[in-house]
Image: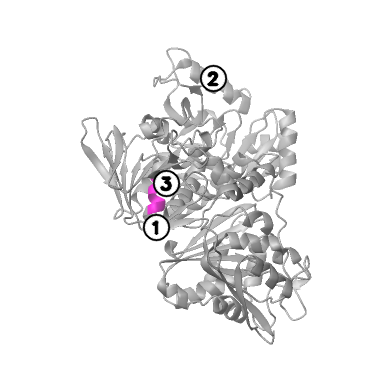
Amino acid sequence: MTLSPDPSPTSGRGSKTLSLITILFTETLQTMPLTPATLCFDANGTPWSERYGDIYHAQQGGAEQARHVFLGGNGLPERWQSCERFVILETGFGLGLNFLTTWAAWREAGRPCNLHFVSVEAHPFSREDLQKGQALWPEFAPLTAELQANWPELVPGIHRIVLEGGELVLTLVFGDAQKTLRRLMLAADAIYLDGFSPDKNPEMWSPEICHAIARLAAPGATLATWSACGALRRNLAAHEFALERKPGFAGKRHMLVGRYQSRKPVRYKIVPPENRQVIVLGAGLAGSSVAYALAARGWQVTVLERHPESRMGASGNLAGVMRPLPSMDDNFLARLTRAGFLATLNHLKSVAAAGLPARFDTPGAFHLARDEAHEAVQAGIIKQQLPPEFVQFLNRETASKLFGWPVSLGGWFFPKGGWVQPLSLCHANLTAFPERIRLIFSTTVAGFTREHEVWRLFDADGKILAAAPHLIVAGGADGTSFSQLAWLPQKRARGQITWLSADKLPAFAPLICGRGYLTPEVDGIRVMGASFQLDDDDAAMRLADQEENLAKLDLLLPGFAANYPIDATTLLPGRVGFRPMSPDRLPIVGAIPIPDAPNSRHPTIHPDLWCLQGYGSRGIVWSALMADYLASLIAGEPLPLEYDLVRAIAPARFL
């Protein structure tokens, strides 16, 4: 199935869509810090919220309530038997009891479909409190252990947990429900309307929430909730839910069930693909990651790469940086690097568990402040936004002890930051599903055309190299050499890195970065970089660039560059690569519009032509998240990005 949201494809949604876009871009982008829930119990031993003065589930049996109200009220598990994929939207994850009950029921039914469970939570529990709370349900012990092992960082945004070999995907959305629901992109088949009682937390049952879930409901979606209060019935009915009262659970007189019966046009057009075959043009981090993501979903993928397997553009570097980039206003770049950083960590964890050959390490990453003013900003951002498990501020003295060498300023320390060897990750991605990924290296594609709903790629002599209904261009710095992408304002940036012998440097483990970066030791080498020149195609190593890199090393570790004297006859070793840079430094991901098409208000797109471009120097951070996003978009699944972020990275933003 192909989910076609509004960011670039042709649609006819008119002024209502435009007004929503206006709201999304005019409201503040800053994400408030999460306030985690604190686990408490009432006199009966039922989990209790001090914040709202209410219990998390019925005292008579939380799992039984979930089965009666949410599964039974939505006709589950019977409805799973007649579909390929099913999407559930829940308001209020809490301790995850509704999810665990649903997971267990889905398993007992024989895992009949691919199941997506999307849940919003403003106050998530820490992993420790989750373990204590879920210990109340020993019948779910194997499930709770797996959920707890994959529990995400308590930072705002969307977090994906892939379970059961990809057949079950839990998408957790941490943040205020009224703000986050309006930014989600999905089509829910069933809705679990849950939360603390209306008199304790009226916002969760408000007209705004009812409007948001109606926006996310698929045609004919069902809804169930334990509350049957009159205000809720009126709010849901006003948003085109046909409602019925049913007997409630454990002596409660009534509960509500409903069905979405809107006459409005479908917001997300879902089209079943006739053929799940796709060509990926490029085998670097972008291309290999999306090949992995689609193959994991059962697609047949053909990957074409102009380089030999042992050398793939900028992805051939020995080691690269993995860390996010916070900002005071939590802007698009901050949100995307945060989500991307966490997605990459999860992906690396998955490939390592599968025994795939990705080389990486997470000893931490220190981001040195530029000056004293920036140092103060860094400290303020952490205080306002992010927990210490994600990022800490280290003053100059503490950072100097960390590296065994005096640094000039303090900065951010990301405990889970580190380095990745890009080529090894590309190999891991491309070898994960050998029965589904076909590799063609050392092949230059001159262009591609679409005939009879199939994309055909040809070489300089016109010979057809490959053909498939879907085509993804992930060509790095060369991606815009094709006519369909030539209008994109992507620039080609030359970058030269320097390899330093590790024996002359302090034996510190963390990565250090700022205006440049220096990795921990990899095979006796520390990678330092990188220079930056736009529209410079010189592939030869240059003395001036090595001197520039050593100057950056002096900014990171003052005085250390003296250990590496160079001149025209003793040029330090290194590597030159070319990175695809976008004007706004955000990736360019999504459907490819036709720039000269007459309907500029809703751009016309090339059918089933997609791109993963503009990664710049953040290929490691972007790769897993952008691959998951594009694969979800093509397959018609709930998206792992909010609506405003989807628009921020869409190629259509440059029209």
First-in-chain label (2 vs 1): 1
Dividing the picture into quadrants, the one containing residue 558 is: top right
Q: Magenta stretch: residue 290 in it?
A: yes
Main SS of the magenta part reads: helix
x and y percentages locating residue 144 in the rendered image: 56, 69
- Name the residue beneath numbered marker 2: 548
Farthest residue in the bottom direction?
251
Q: Are marks 2 and 1 in contact (CB under 8 Å)?
A: no
First-in-chain label (3 vs 1): 3
> How many numbered markers are drawn?
3
First-in-chain label (2 vs 3): 3
Report the front residue among 186 and 360.
186
Distance from the alpha carbon under mark 2 to that under mark 3: 32 Å
The three-letter amino acid code for the residue at tag 1 is Arg
Dividing the picture into quadrants, the one containing residue 508 is: top right
Q: Is residue 526 above or below residue 612?
A: above
Query: How busy is the neighbourhood of tag 2: few (under 14 within 10 Å), some, or many (20 plus)?
Result: some
Query: How busy is the neighbourhood of tag 1: few (under 14 within 10 Å), some, or many (20 plus)?
Result: some
- Name the residue beneath numbered marker 3: 289
Residue depth check, mark 3 versus mark 1: number of the one nearer the observer: 1
The three-letter amino acid code for the residue at tag 2 is Glu
Question: Dividing the image into 4 quarters, which one contains the N terminus?
Answer: bottom left
Residue depth check, mark 2 versus mark 3: number of the one nearer the observer: 3
Look at the image and tell me whether residue 40 can be seen: yes
The three-letter amino acid code for the residue at tag 3 is Ser
> For the residue labelled by badge 2, is the local secondary structure a helix, a strand or a loop?
helix
Residue depth check, mark 2 versus mark 1: number of the one nearer the observer: 1
x and y percentages locating residue 57 in the rendered image: 68, 75
Distance from the alpha carbon under mark 2 to that under mark 1: 45 Å
Q: Is residue 338 above or below residue 103?
A: above
Name the residue rendered at 59%, 59% in the picture: 215
Q: Which residues are magenta?
A: 288-294
